[in-house]
Amino acid sequence: MLGFPNWKIWTIIGTLVLGLIFAAPNFIPDRVLSAAPGFVPTHQLNLGLDLRGGSHILLEAATDDVRKQKLDGLEEIVRGELKDADGGAVPFSDLGIAAGRVAFTVTDPTALDRAVETLRKVTKPVGNLTGQRDVDVAVVDGNRVTLTPTDAGIASATNSAMAQAVEVIRRRIDELGTREPTIVRQGDNRIVVQVPGLQDPSQLKALLGKTAKLEFKLVDMDADPAAVAEGHPPAGSQILPYADQPGTVVVKRRAMITGDQLVDAQVSNDESGSPAVSFRFDSAGGRRFAKATQENVGKPFAIILDNKVISAPRINGAILGGSGIITGNYTTESANNFAILLRSGKLPVELKVIEERTVGPDLGADSIKAGTLAAVVATLAVAVLMIATYGRFGVYSVLALILNIIMILGIMSVVGATLTLPGIAGLVLTIGAAVDANVLINERIREEQRKGRGVIASVEVGYRDATRTIWDANSLNIIVAIIMFLFGSGPIKGFAVVLSIGIATSVFTAVTVTRLMVSRWLTAKRPAALAI
Amino acid sequence: MPLKLVPDNTNIGFVRRRYLAFALTLLLTLGSIGLLATRGLNLGVDFIGGLTMEVAFDKAPPLDGLRARVESLGVGKAALQEFGNARTILIRLPLPPGDQTAVQKVVAKVEGNLKASYGKVSFRRVESVSGKVSQELVQKGALAVLLSMLAVAVFTWFRFEWHFGVSTVVALVHDVTVTLGFFALTQLEFDLNVVAAILTIIGYSLNDKVVIDDRIRENLRKYRQMDIGPIIDLSVNETLPRTVMTSLAMIVALTAMLLLGPDVIFGFTAAMLLGIVVGTYSSIFVSSSLLIVLGVKPRAVAVEKKRTAATGAERIR
């Protein structure tokens, strides 16, 4: 029990040294670290947002939105495809969306098969092995055709929309010039955004909440004002509110052009010198824009962002250069935000903030200070208690305790775990567990001494019997920690991480390392009695 | 000469006093349930959804005036609470209807008004949690606690005997209930951090019970002819120095956290501190004595020893 072969001693020392090396960057100023050669480990502990301040925002995509968009898109596709079907246009009526499907009636029965054939061709296989497609095309009641998006189709559309949303968000946040944001998907339809060190998240949230779908649509001049007042726009038109003034505009549903082909947007000034946003299309978009404006000279059109009309100017002449300017009630800041939104592209789905936590940098700094102070005082108090109670063995325990803390810091730095406030509390609990292991051992040795056993025998039996108990207790704690990690959320997870690492290292330092120290002392001094 | 917190070879009759302990335990548990039923927990936004702002003032504002001022803004019913010191106030508001811009507007409104009336104020922390998320957090938290208990029961059953599993879980339920009762009594905010604390209490209390259970099992094998009562007394007495020392170390460490640590984890630390005391009590007085009621037989454990010795499962070191 007390004999240590050389290789074992060196493995133990090696492990401790490694822990020390990996923990070291946390105690060295950044200035020195950045000058260190490449092979030196420089990973520092990640501090959670609760410690260093910053914003945590959880966004949720409206999945219904995806279905609705899919249906809207499908309706457009049907309209276009039937017109351009092989073998001539398919005559149809009653095209519309109802009960989660697109349906229309083919008025010429002989064209029915051709219509179905044409539409089947535009459905896409969904990436699985069952051969499922994203849309089911079916014929009901003899001449009515329905197109139903399948669940797999919606799932795949949601998936790609979310992936795209993450990219758009990343671009928007990068435009703000914020340091090291974390943007990750969570579950099927959520995105977590964490931006450390952000003082005021309102600008960030203003940017995240916008879909930034830019459209140019013709104003419908023929709409009957009475019907519009009752909320009934003419077929093929829709009623949209103004963004920053009361009133509504009736516009054609079909967009002249959308913002997808924008290549740049910048803050500029209009003729009167007030802030505005200038934009530029790519060459294809520019040609389309030129054509659309050419065909509609003299008519008013609406510039629409997220289904709100920003302005509805008259087209004075064809805009040929592929660029233009949007004026409105802008301040320099809001114009800049708008330009960022346009540059970063539109969000494929609407995102809602469902959870937000912002910690100011003062509070974060206070927490670190108070947390560190408390941890140091707690360790000192425990150390005094241990040494007063167990003398030399207490000193060994305290050394093991300090090594334990260093090991935890080292491992957390290497694996890139995040230390949060509950994590610090987990550290305290780990200190408790480590102390407990040594208390168990030392009390056992005392017991064996009382029974009249010799020095070596007492220590041997003490370690052997206590180790069994320590294993029992710690394996249970590991199980609990793993459950916390798997099923807990946020703070509970942060706590579980520290606890799991701490339990593993504490068994090593409190049992193995102290045993090595005790055994070296016993072999060197051969004491006749133990003061314990 | 090293310090001894507990004299050598104590022989306290814990088992003899078990009915007193059971009565006290029952009283504590029922009392806690009563408190939970009547006062309820002061649930934080994590669990009920809503908006929380931690605001630091230059000097302590009168709470009634502050509440009236905030509520006059038409943002709903405000719950105010001192946080750590009288200058720092936690303002809780219901989540405004509508999307996130609505939350933003409420925060801006409150901030503007407070700055105008109180001068220098700083918003140290703003949290908003929607009803949907808070519901999930409740479910996840409860699931984590329940699964931990279940895992404990299964583990102790396999490692010892079913009696140990039952007595441990009964004691743990008591520990958790009393801690919840404490939160109902003090009306300290019950948030996600506190759930982490409760899980920790389960872990710690467990540790305590396993140590004593281990010793009971050992003694059952050593003294085949002894009755279960004296064996439990012997085991609890033998482990008493360890129980006291470890609990004391934890209490010392947690008191440091409580007094010096950041205010944000005050509730967390308070819960742990109480949990340690309650857990230690239930380990010494409840879970071990419960074994008698459940009828652990020395023979059962002795037979089990043969089985495990044969498979070598006992020799984990």
Image (cartoon, coloured by chain):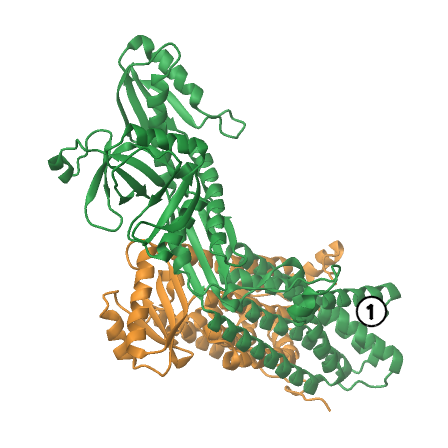
Chain colours: A green, B orange
* Residue at the front extreme of this rendering: A271
* Residue at the left extreme of this rendering: A226
Residue at 65%, 78% (x, y): give it.
Answer: B242
**Number of marks drawn:** 1
Instruction: Where is residue A382? Give x, y as percent.
Output: 63, 81
Examine the image and state in which quarter residue B247 appears. bottom right
- Foreground of the two, A189 or B315: A189
Q: Which chain carries label 1?
A: A
Examine the image and state in which quarter residue B224 appears. bottom right
Q: In which quarter of the image is the C terminus of chain B?
A: bottom right
Position above or below: A151 against A2: above
Residue at 77%, 64% (x, y): give it.
Answer: A15
Instruction: Where is residue B54? Give x, y as percent.
Output: 39, 71
Position above or below: B291 against A214: below
- Callout 1: helix, strand or loop? loop
Instruction: Tell me the amino acid under the disc marked 1.
Output: Met
Q: Quadrant of the N terminus of chain B?
A: bottom right
Instruction: Where is residue A26? Give x, y as percent.
Output: 65, 69
Residue at 45%, 69% (x, y): give it.
Answer: A360
Which residue carries the number 1 mark? A1
